Structure formats: C-alpha cells, structure tokens
Amino acid sequence: QVQLVESGGGLVQPGGSLRLSCAAIGRTINSFTMGWFRQGPGKEREFVAGIAWTGGNTRYPNSLKGRFTISRDNAKNTLYLQMNSLQPEDTAVYYCAADVPVGTWIRATAGDYKYWGQGTQVTVSS
C-alpha cells in the first residue's frame, strides 16, 4: 500500500509555470512506474506524463511534449511535474498515480494505475 499526496497546484497566468510534487508515503516509489493524469471540467481523465521505475524512460502525449517534464527523486520518494507555457486549456485537477511495473513500459490508461493521490487543482487564467 502506498499513499500519494500531491501539492503545488494553484492559480497561474497564461504563459506561466508551475511545478507539482507528489510525495509517497508507505512504500518507496522506485517500486512503481509513476504517472500524472489530469481531469478538466466535464472531461475524462487523461494521461499527462509517465516515468518508468528505473527513471530512464518517460512518456508524454504528443500534445504536451516540450511543455511538461516528469521527473522523480527516489531518494526523496517524490515525483514531480514541471509545467511550462501553461494555457487555459491546461486547467484541471492533476493527479499522480502509481502502477505496478511491466518492465519499463509506461502505460497511459488510468485504469491500469493502482494507487492514486487526491489531486491538486491547477487553474490557468488571467
């Protein structure tokens, strides 16, 4: 069992940046493939970024490549998401999630992830 706690959300102007953090409690995150998902108002939960348990592989949807960067600090047992050039359409609740590793494959379907945080709100608005 692992508990995930996100932080770092808030209100940011278009073009701004935020860094989200996800602290793991109960188990070390180096046992898991980790991912970030988001859910905007009236939308389905969508994959934002993932990182293999080794830290060597990352995965992003094409629409977010170059703006979002996922990283992990296993020593701090923390996952990060650096978000740059934020736009109003990035407004959503952002969730971190842990998946039991399947080699170094990073899955992009929410249903495959076993553990979830409670989410942190990101609002991009002027």
Image (cartoon, rainbow, N blue to C red):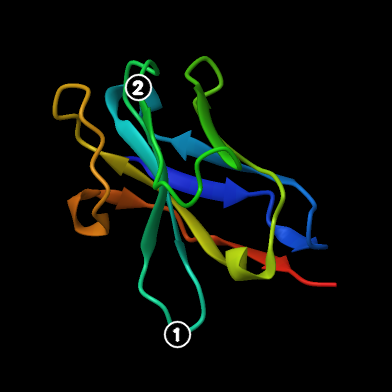
User: How far from the left and from the top, in percent, is residue 100?
Assistant: 20, 35
Q: Nearer the viewer, residue 39 or 87?
A: 87
Amino acid on which the number 1 mark rests in the picture:
Gly
Q: Is 126 left or right of 56, judged from the image as shown?
A: right
Q: Quadrant of the N terminus?
A: top left
Dot 2, crowdedness within 10 Å: few (<14), some or many (≥20)? Answer: few
Q: Which quarter of the picture shows residue 28?
A: top left
> Are the residues tagged 1 and 2 within 8 Å (C-beta)?
no
**Res 56 visible:** yes
User: How far from the left and from the top, in percent, is residue 29?
Assistant: 38, 27
Q: Residue at x 50, y 41 (%)?
A: 65
Q: Which residue is mark 1?
A: 42
Residue sitting at the far bottom? 42
Q: Is residue 92 above or below residue 62?
A: below
Residue sitting at the far left? 102
Q: Is 45 left or right of 92, judged from the image as shown?
A: left
Q: What SS does tag 2 mark?
A: loop
Q: Residue at x 37, y 61 (%)?
A: 46
User: How far from the left and from the top, in percent, is residue 37?
Assistant: 42, 55
Q: Quadrant of the C terminus?
A: bottom right
Amino acid on which the number 2 mark rests in the picture:
Asn
Q: Which quarter of the picture shows residue 84?
A: top right
Q: Is 85 left or right of 41, judged from the image as shown?
A: right
Q: Which residue is mark 2?
A: 57
Q: Earlier in the sequence, mark 1 or mark 2?
A: 1
Q: Is 73 left or right of 42, judged from the image as shown?
A: right
Q: Residue at x 23, y 49 (%)?
A: 114
Dot 1, crowdedness within 10 Å: few (<14), some or many (≥20)? Answer: few
